[in-house]
Image: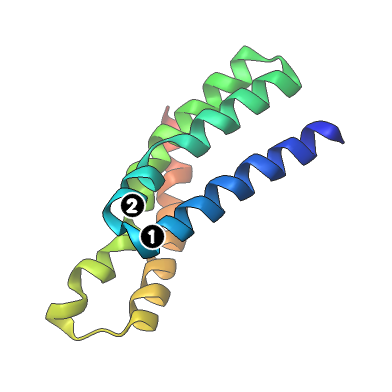
Amino acid sequence: MMLMMLKFSVAAMVIAFTSWLAGKRPELAGFIVALPLTTLLALLFSYTEYKDSATSVAFAKSILAGVPISLLFFVPFLLAERLHLSFWHCYVGGIVLLIAGYFLHRQIVQWL
């Protein structure tokens, strides 16, 4: 239970800090969010909790496959001005692309 509370606290602090920073220095906040902080923490916590190297390696491979696919979320935002998309169009479109990307991710992970 204590480990779970630590996980929640660390994640909440990272999210709270970067969302606060986004209002003051959006470029820096974006860079921090783009860092693999979640990956570093999740791999560490997962290994600490389960002590299974094979599972950690499989987890890391899944993350490696998922990172480029997760960038699909940003495609509508890149096209927003050209296509005159509102924030909500971009947001929903990004989620739809992520759902499609999930199925691609499943195929890639099976191949790895």
* Vertical arrangement, residue 100 with respect to residue 83, above or below: above
Marking on residue 97: none
Image color mode:
rainbow
Is residue 8 shown left or right of residue 86?
right
**Which corner quadrant of the image does residue 56 belong to?**
top right
Between residue 93 and residue 10, name the one nearer to us: 10
Q: Nearer the viewer, residue 87 or 26?
A: 26
Residue tagged by mark 1?
22
| Quadrant in the picture for the C terminus | top left
Amino acid under label 2? Gly
The residue lying at 40 percent from left, 55 percent from top is: 101
Q: Quadrant of residue 49?
A: top right
Instruction: Please provide percent x and percent y for residue 74.
Output: 30, 62
Whether pointer 2 and pointer 1 mark residues with C-beta atoms closer than 8 Å, the reply is: yes
Q: Crowding at label 1, few (<14), some or many (≥20) Cα neighbours within 10 Å?
A: some
- First of labels 2, 1 by sequence position: 1
Residue placed furthest toward the right = 1
Query: Identity of the amino acid at label 1?
Result: Ala
Image coords of residue 36 (percent x, y): 42, 35
Q: Is residue 19 above or below residue 53?
A: below
Task: Name the disc covering residue 30, or none.
Answer: 2
Going 50% across and 34% down the picture, which residue do you hit?
39
Determine whether the residue tagged by mark 1 lies in a helix, strand or loop. Answer: helix
